[in-house]
Image (cartoon, helix red, strand yellow):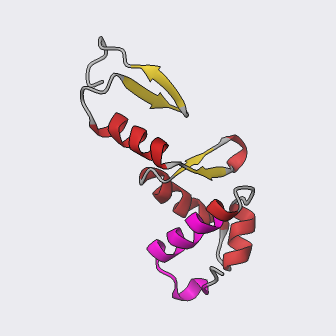
Amino acid sequence: MYTMHRQAMKEEDLDWEVYHLIAADPTRDAGSLAAYLHCSPDDIRGSFGRLERALLIEREEGGRVHVLSVQEILLRCQARYSRDFPFVIEGGVIKAKDDREPGK
Protein backbone atom coordinates (compact mmCIF):
# COMPACT_ATOMS: atom_id res chain seq x y z
CA MET A 1 0.00 0.00 0.00
CA TYR A 2 2.04 2.98 1.27
CA THR A 3 5.56 1.66 1.53
CA MET A 4 8.62 3.69 0.60
CA HIS A 5 12.16 3.30 1.86
CA ARG A 6 13.12 6.07 4.30
CA GLN A 7 16.54 6.86 2.82
CA ALA A 8 14.90 8.10 -0.40
CA MET A 9 12.02 9.89 1.33
CA LYS A 10 11.79 13.67 1.73
CA GLU A 11 9.94 15.20 4.69
CA GLU A 12 6.83 15.88 2.64
CA ASP A 13 6.81 12.28 1.38
CA LEU A 14 7.16 11.00 4.94
CA ASP A 15 4.33 13.30 6.04
CA TRP A 16 2.12 11.96 3.23
CA GLU A 17 2.83 8.37 4.28
CA VAL A 18 2.29 9.08 7.99
CA TYR A 19 -0.98 10.94 7.34
CA HIS A 20 -2.43 8.12 5.25
CA LEU A 21 -1.29 5.41 7.65
CA ILE A 22 -2.89 7.25 10.58
CA ALA A 23 -6.09 7.76 8.58
CA ALA A 24 -6.20 4.04 7.77
CA ASP A 25 -5.37 2.91 11.33
CA PRO A 26 -5.61 5.54 14.09
CA THR A 27 -4.25 3.10 16.69
CA ARG A 28 -0.70 3.40 15.30
CA ASP A 29 1.80 5.27 17.44
CA ALA A 30 5.18 6.79 16.58
CA GLY A 31 7.02 3.55 17.33
CA SER A 32 4.89 1.34 15.12
CA LEU A 33 4.90 3.92 12.31
CA ALA A 34 8.70 4.20 12.54
CA ALA A 35 9.10 0.43 12.35
CA TYR A 36 6.71 0.17 9.41
CA LEU A 37 8.35 3.04 7.48
CA HIS A 38 11.93 2.07 8.42
CA CYS A 39 12.77 5.39 10.06
CA SER A 40 13.31 6.68 13.57
CA PRO A 41 10.58 7.62 16.06
CA ASP A 42 12.10 11.14 16.02
CA ASP A 43 11.40 11.32 12.27
CA ILE A 44 7.78 10.35 12.97
CA ARG A 45 7.44 12.88 15.79
CA GLY A 46 8.81 15.55 13.43
CA SER A 47 6.19 14.54 10.89
CA PHE A 48 3.49 14.73 13.59
CA GLY A 49 4.58 18.30 14.34
CA ARG A 50 4.45 19.36 10.69
CA LEU A 51 1.05 17.71 10.18
CA GLU A 52 -0.29 19.33 13.34
CA ARG A 53 0.94 22.80 12.28
CA ALA A 54 -0.74 22.21 8.90
CA LEU A 55 -4.01 21.54 10.79
CA LEU A 56 -4.28 17.97 9.47
CA ILE A 57 -3.90 15.98 12.69
CA GLU A 58 -4.23 16.43 16.45
CA ARG A 59 -2.01 14.89 19.10
CA GLU A 60 -3.78 13.21 21.98
CA GLU A 61 -2.59 12.37 25.46
CA GLY A 62 -0.47 9.25 25.50
CA GLY A 63 1.30 10.09 22.24
CA ARG A 64 -1.48 9.02 19.89
CA VAL A 65 -2.73 11.17 17.05
CA HIS A 66 -5.85 11.32 14.94
CA VAL A 67 -6.70 12.82 11.58
CA LEU A 68 -8.92 15.90 11.77
CA SER A 69 -12.20 15.97 9.84
CA VAL A 70 -12.77 18.59 7.16
CA GLN A 71 -15.07 20.45 9.55
CA GLU A 72 -12.39 20.46 12.29
CA ILE A 73 -9.77 21.68 9.82
CA LEU A 74 -11.99 24.54 8.66
CA LEU A 75 -12.89 25.54 12.22
CA ARG A 76 -9.26 25.50 13.37
CA CYS A 77 -8.15 27.47 10.33
CA GLN A 78 -10.81 30.08 10.96
CA ALA A 79 -9.91 30.25 14.67
CA ARG A 80 -6.23 30.67 13.82
CA TYR A 81 -6.51 33.32 11.11
CA SER A 82 -9.75 35.24 11.66
CA ARG A 83 -9.38 38.20 14.01
CA ASP A 84 -13.12 38.43 14.65
CA PHE A 85 -13.74 34.71 15.29
CA PRO A 86 -15.41 34.53 18.73
CA PHE A 87 -13.75 31.29 19.88
CA VAL A 88 -10.30 29.84 20.56
CA ILE A 89 -9.31 26.19 20.48
CA GLU A 90 -7.01 25.09 23.28
CA GLY A 91 -6.08 21.46 23.69
CA GLY A 92 -9.00 20.39 21.54
CA VAL A 93 -11.46 22.39 23.65
CA ILE A 94 -13.46 25.22 22.08
CA LYS A 95 -13.68 28.22 24.40
CA ALA A 96 -15.26 31.66 24.06
CA LYS A 97 -12.59 34.24 23.32
CA ASP A 98 -11.86 36.66 26.14
CA ASP A 99 -12.06 40.09 24.47
CA ARG A 100 -10.18 41.66 27.35
CA GLU A 101 -6.96 39.85 26.44
CA PRO A 102 -4.85 41.76 23.89
CA GLY A 103 -4.16 39.94 20.63
CA LYS A 104 -7.05 37.53 20.99
Which quadrant of the view contains residue 7? bottom right
Residue 27's spot in the image, x, y percent? 75, 56
Which residue reaches farthest front? 71
Residue 3, given in percent of the width and then of the height, sits at: 64, 83
Question: Could you say where residue 93 lies in the image, as x and y percent from the top left?
Answer: 54, 28
The relative height of residue 76 versus residue 99 in the rendered view (above or below) is below
As rendered, which of 45 and 80 lies closer to the eye? 80
Q: Residue placed at 25% from the left, 26% from the top? A: 84
Would residue 85 appear left or right of 54 to someone viewing this image?
Answer: left
Q: If the image is split into quadrants, where does the N terminus sit?
A: bottom right
Is residue 5 inside the magenta stretch? Answer: yes
Residue at the (57%, 73%) spot, across then down: 17
Residue at horizontal 60 percent and vertical 46 percent from the top: 59
- Asked whether residue 43 appears in the rendered view, the answer is no
| Magenta highlight range | 4-21
| Main secondary structure along the magenta-highlighted residues | helix
Q: Which quarter of the rendered picture does the C terminus lie within? A: top left
In the rendered image, residue 45, in percent from the top left (x then y), is placed at 59, 60
* Residue 39 magenta: no
The quarter holding residue 31 reads bottom right
* Quarter of the figure with residue 87: top left
Please report the residue visible at 31 percent of the width from the left and 16 percent of the height from the top. 101
Q: Is residue 74 visible?
A: yes
Number of numbered tags placed on the structure image: 0
